[in-house]
Image: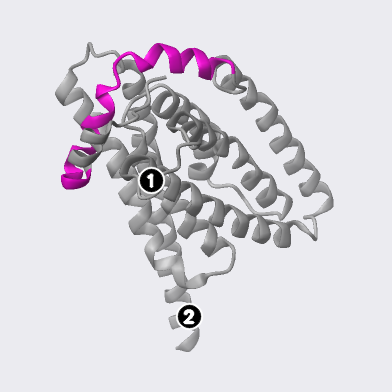
Amino acid sequence: MVLYQPTCSQHSQYTENPAVWPQLSLRSGSLGSANMAFEDDRPLTSLQSVILTTGPFVFLWSTLKGYVARNGPFAVARPITRLNSQVYALFSLGLAYLILNDVFHFHDLEQVQSADLAYVYHLSKFYEYIDVFNLVAAGTAINPHMAFHHITTPFLTYFRVLNATDWQLFAFLNCLHHFWMYAYFGGVSSFRPILRVTGWVQLIAGIGLDVYYFATHGQGAPEARNRAIGLMILTRYAMLYYEEIKTANGQKGAGAEQKGEKAD
């Protein structure tokens, strides 16, 4: 895995000109093979291991859905979901800061390595399986966007974070979006208006970084396959997110019309 660890001169250049963020991590050179071998020793860092988690996840999801359909939702599911959202919001904010610090070095945290942050971020996508279990246990229907997202996100982080350069901006924006989103799920209703903004920003930035990579490196570049897969997944997220928003707006409009008819 190629992960950027800036020198002092590069850090100075970076802080003076944030626009160089997408290019900096491409200069890591010989770090790639050593980091990749190290990461291969960790759980869930091989493509095979990521694939193998999908089956149990879908099986448990289907089993829980069938149980709830027969017996009704669990009474404790909603309080647990709320608590989990609050904890994960704080975790996302902390991870977002550490990723940003990994680039700008606000504080000297030598014990926090780029490879470790990438790995923790990757693992967090498996933890998000709990979202589906909690919602299904509460009797909530899982929409197509959420279903596709939770099944494929570990693949996205495998290709786009563990095995690609310039992963920090994408991961930072995603963690920041998750802070606002999970805080909203945890009870901070005032955060709702910003969710569409942060949701689109992370998707557009992620897609833009991959398009920029192809534009500057060409289709034969070392990361071309990983970038292409990441680009396809993110584009599908954007399409599903748009459909989700359109459906929500349609339901809201239908609800307003029904209220108007009742008032008449």
Residue ranking furthest to the right = 71
**Number of numbered tags placed on the structure image:** 2
* Residue depicted at x 45% and y 67%: 191
Q: Nearer the viewer, residue 260 or 244?
A: 244
Residue, disc 1: 101
Image check: 26 left or right of 246?
A: left
Amino acid at circle 2: Lys
Magenta residues (range): 15-41
Amino acid at circle 1: Asn
Label 2: state its secondary structure.
helix
Q: Quadrant of the N terminus?
A: top left
Residue, disc 2: 259
Specify few, some or many for label 2: CA neighbours under 10 Å numbering under 14, 14-19, or 20 or more.
few
In this view, the mark in front (2 or 1): 1
Whole-number angstrom distance, CA of label 2 to CA of label 1? 50 Å
Label 1: state its secondary structure.
helix
Image check: 42 left or right of 8?
A: right
Percent coordinates x, y for residue 264 in the rendering: 45, 88
* Residue depicted at x 46% and y 73%: 190
